């Protein structure tokens, strides 16, 4: 088995929290792990957000009993969570699973450049709160016969597909960042960055990143709710 030695207990706790949030939206969620040396990237797709979430994890040392140079595998998020030993700061890489379509279309490793126009964190949080409130009020106004999954999806798609000012970043990316714990109250204006590379946009925070294709990820079978 391949054992990951995380940098410390807090890294293990943050990894466990990230996996738990992904599983909250999809109990069968998978994650793709990519590592080289002492840096591990965990990619996940929170169901219903139409984005990719990336959590960077620091390793204390390269893995044991496995690959010597690099690691690249898609595994069950639930099995990985069960293997996390927070006091010991370790995690065991589960057996590989057949990856979902999104796992084969990851953001580029480099070539990212800053994009202007990103509002401050408080404004982003307020934008998400306003979207949640609008979804709730519009859903409650529907007649009983209109309260269908397709109608709720339509309302959600309309709200969360709006962009953040002129940046082109969909509001659903900010919503995902907040829901996954990336946009915490401690995050200040200097902690956020909006980056672009090719057809991708990336919202980077100290706790993780949210990446989204400029044209959306519809070809990967992703829906928005």
Image (spheres, grey):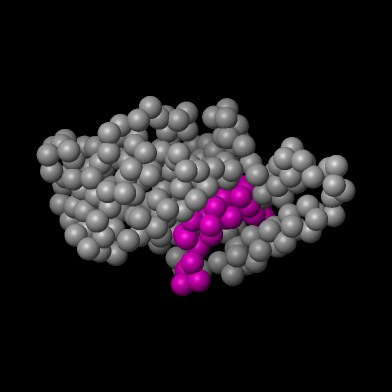
Q: How many marks?
A: 0
Is 204 positioned to the left or the right of 61 in the image? right
Is residue 74 shown above or below 152? above
Q: Which residues are magenta?
A: 164-187
Q: Does residue 177 belong to the magenta stretch? A: yes
Q: Does residue 37 belong to the magenta stretch? A: no
Dominant secondary structure (helix, strand or loop) of the stretch shown in magenta? loop
Closer to us: 195 or 143: 143
The residue positioned 27% from the left and 34% from the top of the image is 95
Residue 182 coordinates in the image, percent (x, y): 47, 59
Location of the C terminus (image quadrant): top right
The residue positioned 54% from the left and 29% from the top of the image is 220
Residue 42 coordinates in the image, percent (x, y): 36, 46
The residue positioned 50% from the left and 71% from the top of the image is 185
The residue positioned 47% from the left and 28% from the top of the image is 101
Is residue 106 shown above or below 137? above
Is 96 positioned to the left or the right of 191 in the image? left
């Amino acid at each position: 088995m391949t054992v990951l030695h995380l940098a410390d207990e807090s890294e293990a706790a943050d990894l466990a929290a990230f996996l738990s949030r992904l599983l909250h939206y999809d109990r069968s969620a998978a994650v793709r792990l990519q590592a080289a040396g002492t840096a591990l990237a965990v990619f996940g797709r929170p169901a219903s957000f139409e984005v990719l979430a990336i959590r960077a994890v620091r390793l204390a040392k390269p893995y044991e009993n496995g690959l010597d140079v690099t690691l690249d595998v898609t595994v069950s998020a639930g099995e990985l969570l069960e293997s996390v030993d927070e006091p010991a700061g370790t995690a065991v890489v589960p057996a590989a699973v057949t990856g979902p379509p999104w796992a084969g279309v990851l953001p580029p490793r480099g070539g990212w450049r800053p994009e202007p126009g990103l509002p401050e964190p408080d404004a982003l949080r307020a934008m998400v709160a306003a979207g949640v409130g609008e979804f709730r009020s519009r859903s409650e106004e529907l007649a009983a016969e209109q309260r269908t999954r397709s109608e709720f999806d339509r309302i959600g798609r309309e709200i969360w597909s709006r962009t953040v000012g002129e940046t082109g970043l969909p509001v659903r990316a900010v919503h995902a960042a907040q829901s996954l714990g990336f946009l915490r109250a401690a995050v200040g204006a200097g902690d956020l960055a909006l980056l672009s590379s090719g057809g991708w946009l990336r919202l980077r925070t100290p706790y993780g990143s949210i990446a989204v294709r400029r044209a959306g990820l519809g070809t990967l079978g992703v829906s928005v709710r």
